[in-house]
Amino acid sequence: MKKAILLLLLFSCNYAFALAQNNKTFHHEKTKMFKPPFQGKRHFCSDESKMTYDVEIKGDHVVISYEKIKVTGVFKNGLLFTSDPQEIKYRHHAGKYNFGKYYVIGADYFSVLNPENGEYFYHQLCKK
């Protein structure tokens, strides 16, 4: 009788421990998936300047074209990291919480950071 009770107690403790371990690992496996705001190519303009930007997104990869310059980038955790020398210079001097925020792309807007004052130049979809 004592053996049966001991085995039952051992089995229930083992089961409770295994259940607790499963719950712990389950919470660690949850991650947020960030998707780019759109796929394909879009043309952005500004009322304030004559500068226009073409933004093409395929998967997580981005190509930003303006004037005769092409900048490539990639989305990581919802932030856009590019090969633009201005962004790299900004990242070099900015805090780590500002990384990936030089260019901001939405479904219907595109913004470029002005590092001198911290404001963004706002561009919207061009009217055809």
Image (tube, rainbow, N blue to C red):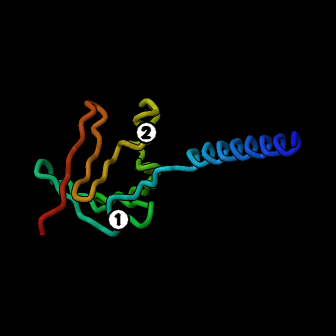
Q: Is residue 10 above or below residue 38?
A: above
Left or right placement of residue 51 versus residue 8 in this view: left
Q: Position of residue 108 (x, y in %)?
A: 22, 58
Q: Residue at x 12, y 65 (%)?
A: 127
Quarter of the rendering containing residue 100: top left
Q: Residue furthest front?
A: 1
Say which amino acid is labelled 1.
Answer: Glu
Q: Position of residue 23 (x, y in %)?
A: 60, 45
Q: Position of residue 106 (x, y in %)?
A: 28, 54
Instruction: Give the Cα distance between marks 1 and 2.
Output: 21 Å
Q: Is residue 112 above or below residue 89?
A: below
Q: Residue at x 35, y 57 (%)?
A: 69
State which quarter of the image contains the N terminus: top right
Q: Residue at x 77, y 41 (%)?
A: 9
Q: Position of residue 31 (x, y in %)?
A: 51, 50
Say which amino acid is labelled 2.
Answer: Phe
Q: First in sequence: mark 1 or mark 2?
A: 1
Judging by the rendered image, the residue that carries numbered circle 2 is 99
Seen from the viewer's position, the closer of residues 59 and 54 is 59
Judging by the rendered image, the residue that carries numbered circle 1 is 56
Q: Please, what secondary structure does the residue beneath circle 1 have?
A: strand
State which quarter of the image contains the C terminus: bottom left
Seen from the viewer's position, the closer of residues 114 and 104 is 104
Question: Cβ–Cβ below 8 Å for labels 1 and 2?
Answer: no
Left or right placement of residue 68 versus residue 94 in this view: left
User: Within 10 angstroms of label 1, few (less than 14), some, or many (20 or more) residues?
Assistant: some
Q: Residue at x 44, y 30 (%)?
A: 95
